Image (cartoon, grey):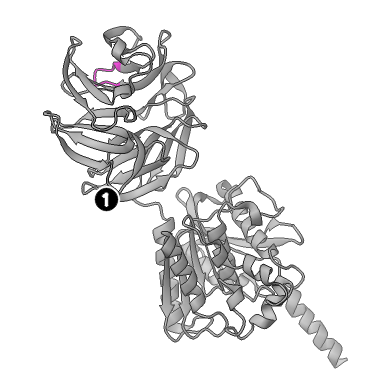
Amino acid sequence: MKKLFLLLFAALCVFAQPKPPEVPADVQADFDVEYSRVGERVAMDIFRPKTMNGVQPAVLCIHGGGFRAGSRASYHALAIKLAQRGYVAATASYRLAPRHQFPAAVEDVKAAVRFLRANAKKYSIDPDHIGTTGGSAGGHLVLMLGLTGDNKVFDGYGPNLDQSAKVQAVVNYYGPTDFTKSYGKSVDAHLVLPLWLGGDLEHERKSHQVSSPLHYANPLAAPLLSIHGTEDKYVEHAQSVWITERLQSMGAEAELLTLPGAGHGFKGADAEKAEAALFAFFDKQLRVKNQRKVLISDHGPKGEIVLMNWPSGQELARYPNGRGHDVQPLPNGHVLYTVAPEHKVVEVDAQGKRVWECCDKLEHPLSAQRLGNGNTLIGDAKAGRVIEVDKMGKTVWQYASEDIGNMRMRNSRRTAAGTTLICVEAVAKVIEVDKDGKIIWSWQAPGDLSKRRLYQASRLANGNTRMTISDPGEIVEVNPKGEIVRSIAGNKMDIQMGWTSGHDEFPNGNLFISDYTGRRLLEIDPQGKVVNQLRMGPRTVASVAVVR
């Protein structure tokens, strides 16, 4: 009878749900939210600020327990603290060994990220800023999230497969990174790993390698902070050293906080130091601070004008442009841009509704600029003319020449002095014409003119002219005498670009530049140093503009 009682008590301990925590008045909690049901039901608990102003970054917490035990309730305290700091924090369960072996747990945590992204509106989550943290086995799983990103190999068959499982920041507490080196260095690796990987290293070496985060280190990994004690008997401190050094050698952002004398599971001052580092890291990586609104004209397959936050890249609005070239923000919040297939220039309001368009007789408008007098300057590359039209679309000024026709020109811009700069892309030359159509200044780009192309020119307040050139990508500032007084990229090796197209200037003097064929946007300070850059994936950005 006594033995039966003990067995019953043990079963109750295993299957009883943990007691919900005391939730502070300023935190809203949603318990036992199912996020997947592949193999078995798995759920998460979600904590968020009771009062929220817009969307907030999220942090997914993953518990440890040797892949065979543990509870999401162990992260309730941290999740509540994160919620009180303005985050949406979730702590998730996942399928456990030995019933569910690798890669079940990895598939589950990826499904958890996809769930948060799919339900971003419901929980007021910023889907572009999701971080993750975990310890021990949970540390391993968050490393897999940060290293595999949008790699579909571990997506499994869970829900929300249309969503990305990519995270933007990882804080790893003493997670193993190379299982092939765990045996003999961990007090329980010989017990834990065979249960999760289907056998020991001698019989399942491939599983040990495929499940090791170190195997997936890559330059595009999410920013990583690892925290590890030197006296850890379960996961050797060297495991965090290896992943940190491997990522750093690839140019990825990775750092290691070593806690001398600390073991597996931090206590006291070590726990406080680790938690402070976690908060600081997530604040740095996930908080959208000092953002500027910018516009880009995507001439690539997506064919869109995109309003986004810089430098985070968070997209705020999109308007189809049919792979047009130019874009300009207007003071009233409207946007002016070219639409390629319609051969028109359009103006849309903040909701994307067209409020103005021009003109029926355009052949291929590549540039558009709203002038101070309310008129619009349009460069028609096919027709070989630059026209100024009034609000009714009537032409009030025109410059036409065979030299700029047949798609030989690109951008055109009116200067403060009333002259017009026209880029003759085909011969890497810029001309300046006055109101009578007379060329009063020109500049020829140096180099191999069979390759070089000059895309955009703008007149600066100091009288100099800034221009973007291709092959190699370069942005130059030229004085009225035609002398180059500043050059960025070109043949120099510090910054290399393929085809520099659009450019603008931030209020602090930094340049905002599109590397068209390099498919990236760059912010460069007055000293010529890259301070921010964003890889654009499939987008090939022709023009950029800072929203003022």
**Image location of residue 155, percent across then percent down:** 66, 54
| 250 to the left or right of 377 | right
**Image location of residue 367, percent across then percent down:** 35, 22
Question: Which quadrant would residue 91 be assigned to in this image?
Answer: bottom right
Pointer 1: residues within 10 angstroms few (<14), some, or many (20+)? some
Please identify the residue farthest to the bottom as the structure is shown.
2
Query: Does the magenta segment cover residue 383?
Result: no
Name which residue lies at 44% across and 69% down: 245
Name which residue lies at 23% across and 36% down: 476
Q: Label 1 belongs to which residue?
A: 529
**Image location of residue 539, percent across then percent down:** 47, 37
Numbered disc 1: secondary structure: loop
| 289 to the left or right of 213 | left
Residues rendered magenta in the picture: 370-376
With respect to residue 6, does 67 lie above or below?
above
The residue lying toward the viewer, choosing from 217 and 340, is 217
Q: Quadrant of the N terminus?
A: bottom right
With respect to residue 150, does 300 lie above or below?
above
Please identify the residue farthest to the left as the structure is shown.
481
With respect to residue 376, does 170 lie above or below?
below
With respect to residue 418, does 33 lie above or below?
below
- The answer to whether residue 352 is seen in the rendering is yes
Question: Which quadrant would residue 362 be assigned to in this image?
Answer: top left
The residue lying toward the viewer, choosing from 390 and 489, is 489
Number of numbered discs overlaid on the protein picture: 1
Q: Quadrant of the C terminus?
A: top left
What secondary structure prevails in the magenta region? Answer: loop
Name which residue lies at 13% across and 30% down: 463
Instruction: Name the kind of residue labelled 1 in the image.
Output: Lys
| 422 to the left or right of 14 | left
